[in-house]
Image (tube, rainbow, N blue to C red):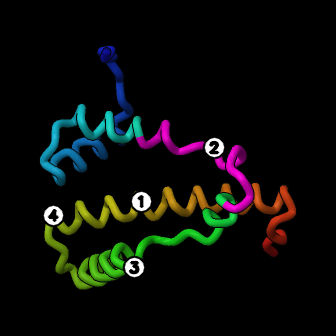
Amino acid sequence: MAEQVTLTLPDSLAQQVREVATLTQRPLEEVLLEWLTRGSAEPEISSLPDDQVLALCDSELSSQEQTQLSDFLGKQRENQLQEDERQQLNQLMRLYRRGLVRKAEAWKVAVERGLRPALG
């Protein structure tokens, strides 16, 4: 059974949802549901076992994502980025930033548990 909920989104989040919905040609509701599902499936790092914390410490974008990101950034530097590529670049940058935050959180937990030495 499904439950209908009404949300008021901050402008910046609403803009992100619209961009992804447009890019993927899906309804906003579907994009939001996907994000909520993914967010609920992403456990707190402090609750993960040591091996998963260490894996997050070492995580990176896939080689394909890294290549795409480099290509888009190069085109952006040369002012040759098309609108659809700009949207894809924005999506990749969000993914990259989220990965960095998760990686930093994992490092914090790993240091607290004595799995990794403190940086600096």
Q: Is residue 82 left or right of residue 102?
A: left
Residue 51 percent coordinates (x, y) = 69, 62
Within 10 Å of disc 1 (Cα), the crowding (few <14, some 14-19, many 20+) is: some
Residue type of the residue flagged with mark 2:
Glu
Gap between marks 3 and 1, in whole Å?
14 Å
Q: Main secondary structure of the magenta part?
A: helix
Gap between marks 4 and 3, in whole Å?
21 Å
* Start-end of magenta stretch: 38-51
Magenta span includes 5: no
Name the residue carrying label 4: 84
Nearer the viewer's eye, disc 3 or disc 1? 3
Name the residue carrying label 2: 44
- Sequence-earlier tag: 2 or 4: 2
Residue type of the residue flagged with mark 1:
Leu
Name the residue carrying label 1: 95
Nearer the viewer's eye, disc 1 or disc 4? 1
